[in-house]
Amino acid sequence: MMSLQTEISFELNGRPVTVTVPVTMKTLTMLRDMLDLTGTKYACGEGECGACTIRLDGKTINSCLMYAVDCDGRKVVTIEGLKSGKHLHPMQQAFVDNGAIQCGFCTPGMIMQADYLVEDNPELSREQIRRGLEGNICRCTGYTKVLDAVTSVVESSE
Amino acid sequence: MQEVSHYLAPHHLDDAVRAMADGDVTVLCGGTDLAPQTGAHQKDYASTLMNIRRIEGLEEITLVGDTCRIGALSTVTDIGNSLLLQDIAPVLVEAADRFASDQIRNAASIGGNICNASPSGDMIIPLLLLDASVELASWTDAALRTRSVALHVFFTGPGKSVRQDNELLTAVSFTRPAAGFVAHFHKSGPRPALEIATVSLGVGGVLEDGVLNNVRAAMGAVAPTPIRARGVETALEGRPLDAGNIKAAAESASIDAAPIDDVRASAWYRDHLVRVLTEDVLNDVLANGN
Amino acid sequence: MNGKTTIACIEKTTLIGQRVRKPDAADKSTGKTRYINDLILPQMLYGKVLHAGRPHANIVSVDTTAAENLPGVHCVLTGKDVAGLKFGFVRDNVALKDKVRCEHDEVAAVAAESEEIAEQALGLIRVEYQDLPGIFSPEDGRKEDAPLIHDGFPGNKSLHFEFRHGDLAAAEAESDIIVDNVFRTHHVTHCCMGTSCAIADFDNNGKLTIYSQTQYPYNYKMDLAPALGMHPGDIRVIQPPVGGAFGSKLDVYPYEPIAALLARKTGHPVKVAYTREEEFRSAPTRQPAVIHMRTGCKKDGTLTFRSADVLLDNGAYTSWGPTIPVVMMRTVSGHYRVPVIDFNAQAIYTNNPYAGSFRGYGNVQTTFATAQQMDMLADRLDMDPIEFHLKNAQKSGERTPQEALLRECALDKCLTIAAVASDYVNKRRQFSLLRGTDIRYRKGIGLASSIHNAGGAKIHKSDGCGTMLKVDDYARVTVITGASEIGQGIDAVISLIVAEELGVPVEHINIMNNDSDLAPWDVGVHASRTTFIAGEGARRAAIKAREQILDAASGFSGIPAAELDLRGGFVTRDDDGSIVFKLEKLLRKMHFQPEPELVMVTDYYEPKSEPEGANHISDMSAAYAHAVHIAEITVDTWTGEIRVDKVTSAQDVGRIINRAGLEAQVEGGIAIGLGFALSEDMQLEEGILKNPSFRDYKVITAPEMPQLDLHFVEDGCAEGPYGAKGASELPTIVIAPAVANAFCNATGVRILNPPLSPEKVLRALIQFREKEGGTVNSRAAAAAS
């Protein structure tokens, strides 16, 4: 009993990729189960926690809600696509330096969202960062060092 | 659970509504409602799954003459960032800011939000204040037809609307409000957003010399559908917006609302919030209306 | 020619108290880290569980034929496949049930080639149930005519604990003030971001390797074995990185033996992973408690007695939840100096989900009561509130009625520091003056403190931790510790400690602790013990290695070992830091000499504490610590919403080792405690969870976190590594009553049942106005009438 599949082609972390997916599969499942990109996490599957955050055509979305077929012709960036070269991306480095990572399960989604926030508004205040991260749940950190990390990126770009 | 046997992603509206002619189509857009609902088996797929995200011409927000038209594919983020809407209907921007989370705003389409017909539709409240109408397109008698339905008669029950299975919502539009129209939207809860409203509420009107005219009031999560609060409108129409009338409006709001007990709150608490939010919104209107 | 070369010198520095990057942070930041949830083994099958979906029922029949015949299904198991394989603290559980006792009970399990097929197969299993009347509160469970949930537990009674000290009647008689309240705490759950997951794999010698999220790998083998009819020695536990634990993984839960049973039957590795909904329904909870507490004092503020009668909702099975009275009574007897104690706790089986261990472990519930009663007494006494707290605060060297020896006690300092930093006394007075007004937004300030184990807890035969350490020919260090890394940062702490002793960069230390075949025993991550015990074990091992190295260096250089030091990757003179050897060259010299010497050391550290005996009189931890929180809140008296604006914390930590890690644990602990206080609530109706998702189970999000002002008292600790004490549970324990006390300061209203959700707050305000004739929220009261 095969569910209907279709072929899609899109840009994934800067490279073209073509994959055949069941039409009702979500992007999160495609990334994790078919493309071996396990950095994006399943933590709720219903868009409430942000652990599955990726960039789609430059904007962050919850990949657990997005249908994989909708990636066709678009540009997807996951946590694995953030750093280029041997150094960590500045937001990743900021999280590491500020002690903002404990168990780390929420971290990829948190970093993707934080990076988007700062790109969208380089003069973000701490309050605005809080609001911007409202869709990313963390159970370990109490968010304080996450806010410190993001603030440090904002300040260093000034 | 039915299997999807046909998938399409049309680029033109004609093709989309033709595919919907037999009514056996599940429309896919951002997935922010479809994904959790099918995942929880609250909803079954039809035999055709149609992705409407690539239909051209449906994501613009325009003002032509006095008519503001928001394409169904505009996301909540598009609405929140729209300089046009900030200028002519800032209450929509206010509501967009309180909607779910950034990630959801970036994906949720206004068309999907309206068609989902949730009793607590955050974006629907301000649209009701603006006397908005929705545009429904279908392939009927071998041609593309559209009809307009006023939003305040669009919803028929939780998750239900007058949209037929062969119709696609293509836009929501409203007439640019008169000069002096002020409207505000409030949503209950300690979180700024990421919350299915326990109560959401908006009131607007033209404030002139302290008197409120052309009053529109709407509430969410206190009835089977989002509703116009007619009692509130009557209580305020043509009257000075002062403390006494604000209190009377809060009382009317309580009568207009028909809240239920559910996992989020009791009917008692919702009723109480309706009064408080009505006062808060009207105080905002008063403060910003001059 | 006399060309004298300048010899380089290295300054003595210390890492203790510095900020160290967590070793695994870089990989976690890039998504490279493979958590257990991300792992796939070759030929692996996917296991899924059929949950009962009803709270109490006999299983009349289970028909798995259609499921077994679905293509892609390799096996289906039910209760008959595990008959007699009981496990659990009191052996009241089995992996697959013969009777349903709570809604998540596991009735059948499927292993299939994909998750979709396994899910489909579940839908084909036909179960016939005979529903039984359910018990959903401990009060109902102990009624005479209550149905029995387990055979062999008459009266539905589970565990019972009591402790008495002194003459209660006499103490009551000499009290000028007695406060008497019933507190009722609720079901909350851990919400680890990584849902429950286990992968089981049998080899062809019949040995099991289980990839587990466990936080107590050695006793886990002992607890898992009976569920499988195996010997614990034949079980190997691999601990991949996990997405949180917070105590939830301190026991064996059915999905784990289920994975193993499916693997054994199919001959394939099997992975069982829960969805978030399953997680909400199936994961252990915090133990709900009905606490009838009474505290007395004299009019000069001296505490006279404290009594607590506790009724616990055991839930359907006995895990770690019903053992919390062991810790609860420590708070009742040790939170401030209380001469007379009366404690009684009874757990009653119900058809609700059952509790496990959760950060704070009974102390959260108890402190919610003790700290509020202290505040009530402070309200009623005619003295400065801080004076009242200080009057009853123990001093270093005092013993509690249970004989806990508070060797280094800094409660008084914590009280003073927090009170001064927050201007507590002035604000408390100012805010309370506004209670009689009708102002909508009220500010309140509340103080709470507590005491907790900070040097382990001897509740098992050993509270120790083993360490093995080697330094290789490149001066790279491997530390194999029994302590589990669950995100709390023991990897960073151990790296820091070993770097400190061996003078090598933190980055040159590799911590290995995820394979029970490799690593030595540790009792587990709980009781705030890991920095103290695993840290001290690592320190002792590092010192042994250091001594061996300096002895060898002495032999080669002729300089006495006592005059040598290890700094910056070198052996140096201790007095002036002048370099004697490059460390890695020395190690190769040691290795390749005629009688080779490799640096490989072991240690087992058992802290100096006494076992928690049946009479509960023992110094059961090697150290104790206190924390004080002062919460400042704003209450919207029209909607009932509480916003916590600021938390000032003063905590006795003995000595800070990794400053960044300690702060992170305090911040995270406060967030979990705030959820308990304000918004988290498992809404159970007749044993069925109505809000099994983040949409309606509200954990604290970024905008809701208050501003934090953290203070640490470092008065040392004789037993702990560099004087450090355990710290991670106190922040969760103390914050909730601080918020409740702030609420009372703002409004005059006490709420005894968390969470202080908006609706509950509003109802309480209205009720207060109606009873007391106050003017709080007259609008709401008028509306309600």
Image: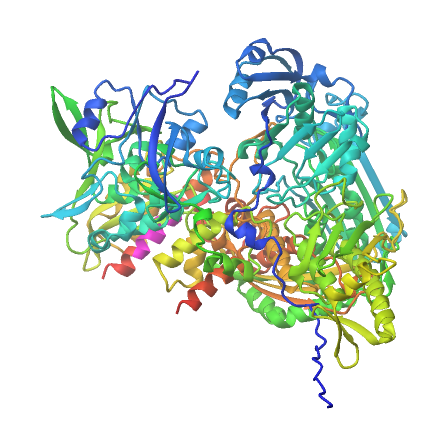
Q: Residue at x 71, y 14 (%)?
A: C80
Magenta stretch: includes residue C622: no
Specify the segment rendered in magenta: B274-284
Q: Quadrant of the N terminus of chain B?
A: top left
Q: Residue at x 80, y 48 (%)?
A: C329
Going by the image, does C527 lie left or right of C169?
left
Comparing C430 with C174, the one in front is C430
Q: Quadrant of the C terminus of chain B?
A: bottom left
Q: From this view, report whether residue C409 is shown above or below residue C197.
A: below
Residue C727, located in which quarter of the rendered image? bottom right
* Residue C485 screen position, x and y as percent: 68, 48
* Residue A90 screen position, x and y as percent: 46, 60
Label count reads 0
Residue most extreme to the front = C1
Q: From this view, report whether residue B218 is shown above or below residue C406.
A: above
Comparing B129 with B110, the one in front is B110
* Residue A147 screen position, x and y as percent: 49, 59
Q: From this view, report whether residue C52 is shown above or below residue A74.
A: above
Comparing A105 with C382, the one in front is A105
Q: Residue B196: in sight, yes or no?
A: yes
Q: Residue C337: in sight, yes or no?
A: no
Report the magenta stretch's main SS: helix
* Residue C585 screen position, x and y as percent: 74, 65
Going by the image, does C56 lie left or right of A82?
right
Residue A30, located in which quarter of the rendered image? top left
Q: Residue at x 39, y 62 (%)?
A: A124
Going by the image, does C527 lie left or right of A29?
right
Residue most extreme to the left = B65
Coloring scheme used: rainbow
Magenta stretch: includes residue B281: yes
Going by the image, does C497 lie left or right of B131?
right
